Amino acid sequence: MKSRLVGGVAAVVIVAVAALWLEPDQTVLGKLAGDAFFQGRPTRSWMRSLRGGPSDQAAAKETLQNGGPAAVPVLGAMLVQAREPEIRFTAADLLAKLGSDASPAGAALLAGAQDADPHVQAVCVAALPKAGVPSSQAVPVLMAHLKTDHLVVAARALAGYREAAAGAIPMLLEIFRDKNQPTESRWNAVRTLGKIGPASAVAIPDLIQGFDDAEWSIREHCAESLGEIGPAAAPSALPGMVRLLSDAVPRVRRDAVRSLGQIGGAAVEAVPEIRKLLEDPEEIVRVAAQNALEKLAPPESSDQPGADKQPAENRPSESGPKNKAGEN
């Protein structure tokens, strides 16, 4: 009798567990396990869909992507909990696309930046500034990735933190100076130095040397970054910057003239050379030159102090005769 009772209880338990497991949306099981929920479905249910056939996967991705902030808890949980790197990658990618709305999943993205799968790592690294993960937490992680295969992704992510990434300046300079580094790595390091801003003034001598680099992308971004560093670059960078105005590559000329405008008053002596670019064959250069001139040599208005004015005795009075039509 006792054995029959035990067997009956065991059978009921097995059936109950099977029912929970086979429940289409696993709602009860998710509640018991403390899953995050989105649209009434727990995390494990969404992961099941992402393990399904192509149509199930596509539908789940579309719904999660369109879910906005409401989907973030489930996406963050999937990034941490999913066994399959493909699902973790999908979660990280969707979080990255949500931008600042993904900020509640910051801890999951930081963990994902150390994921065992390199693809998951890369997308999480790129997502850190977009999701608004605090610089105090993200910058050390990104600096560590400057020593990995994700160097370029990490450099671009550091750029998103602007002056808060100043701690990375020595590493970025080291990357730029290393001629054995790929060109893409070097110019991204230079670009990030510029995005950090005036704190990168220590890099000015190296960036000026970059004007002579054989790679045009290095010359371009050295010019760009000096402009973003600002007036501190003017005394030593000005001669080389003027020389770049005649570079064979349009993008180098554009960034050089744009940076002269950013440097401001200290670059006024370059105005004659900048004016020549108003006739440049490339529109991007002409536009940049015009914008720079508007900053460095704005046209004087007639009411500015010191502007030439017609002597009073030569000006007709308001009540006097008017000029004939056509007279100037």
Image: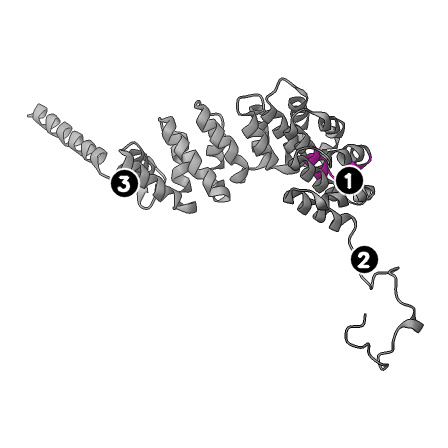
- Judge from the rendering whether residue 197 lies leftward or rightward of residue 296; answer left or right: left
The answer to whether residue 198 is visible is no
Residue at far top of view: 180
The tag on residue 300 is 2
Q: Position of residue 288 (x, y in %)?
A: 68, 45
**Residue range of the region highlighted in magenta in the rendering:** 223-235
The one nearer the camera, 325 or 168, is 325
Q: Quadrant of the C terminus?
A: bottom right
Residue situated in front as seen by the camera: 151 or 244: 244
Secondary structure of residue under mark 1:
helix
Q: Is residue 217 magenta?
A: no
The residue positioned 80% from the left and 45% from the top of the image is: 265
Return the residue at label 3: 27
Precedes in sequence: disc 3 or disc 1: 3
* Kind of residue sitting beneath label 2: Glu
118 in relation to 326, above or below: above
Q: Main secondary structure of the magenta part?
A: helix
Q: Residue 203 is drawn in which quadrant?
A: top right
Hey, which quadrant is residue 117 in on the image?
Answer: top left
Residue 215 lies, in percent from the top left, at: 65, 26
Assign a secondary structure to mark 3. Answer: helix
Q: Is residue 46 left or right of residue 113?
A: left
Tell me the tag on residue 231: 1
Q: Assess disc 3: are there few (<14), some (14-19) or many (≥20) residues with their C-alpha within 10 Å of its C-alpha.
A: many
Mark 1–mark 2 distance (CA, rounded to whole Å): 23 Å
Q: CA distance from mark 3 to mark 2?
A: 72 Å
